[in-house]
Image: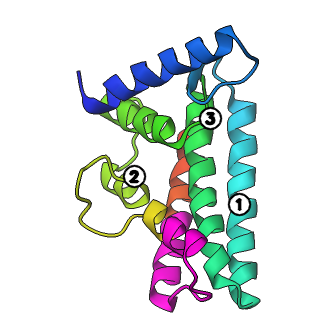
Amino acid sequence: MSHAKNKVEWCLKKAERELEGSDTHRGLVKTEPDKKKAAEHVSKADHYLSATIYLKKGNFSDVSASTVFYAMYQCLLAIAAKFGYESRNQECTFALINSLIGDGKIDFDKNLLGKISSFETEPKEQTTVEVREQYQYGTSLTLEDDIYNEQLELAKKVIAKTKLTVEE
């Protein structure tokens, strides 16, 4: 069983255990496939993308590192919803998308996903997660233009690919 599949199983069990004593979880739950919820996540992704552009124009590019990440993350949640999953854990979401790619259920480039977050121990380039963490928790007030542009274009690709995936 692949690392992604093992992680998905762990996430499903984690949520199941947490839901035994509470109404909330921090894992992955199997639900009914929900194209409406998927479309709502895509709408939220577009909203975050607009916020990213707005923040850059207002000289808050450091904050845009978070909004551009969440634009892409909402896309992954949209795909999860389409296939009948609810995720409340980023690692679980990344594992699920990797698993769906590996099973041939979605036509989503693993390299594209790897630019957002990598399952590899040593990513070849800085991921969007790492950029977000650097600018969210660091003290820099400006996201470098080349990183901003790279992340913005990546988000646009992810959103476009997600729209196709959700509509299939």
- Tell whether 137 sits left or right of 8: right
Q: Which is nearer the eye, 69 or 32?
A: 69
Image marks 1 and 3: residues in contact by CB distance under 8 Å: no
State which region is magenta.
132-156
Reading the image, the residue beneath label 3 is 88
Residue 91 appears at what percent x and percent y? Answer: 46, 40
The first of marks 2 and 1 along the sequence is: 1
Looking at the image, which residue sits at the far top? Answer: 20
Type of the residue with mark 2 = Leu
Disc 1: CA contacts within 10 A as few (<14), some (14-19) or many (>=20) = many
Give SS at disc 1. Answer: helix
Q: Which is nearer the eye, 66 or 154?
A: 66
Give SS at disc 2. Answer: helix
Q: Quadrant of the C terminus?
A: top right
Disc 2: CA contacts within 10 A as few (<14), some (14-19) or many (>=20) = many
Task: For marks 2 and 1, give the CA distance.
Answer: 18 Å
Taken as a whole, is the magenta stretch helix, strand or loop?
helix
Q: Quadrant of the N terminus?
A: top left
Disc 3: CA contacts within 10 A as few (<14), some (14-19) or many (>=20) = some
Mark seen at residue 46: 1
Q: Which is nearer the eye, 68 or 20?
A: 20
The first of marks 1 and 3 along the sequence is: 1
Type of the residue with mark 3 = Arg
Reading the image, the residue beneath label 2 is 113
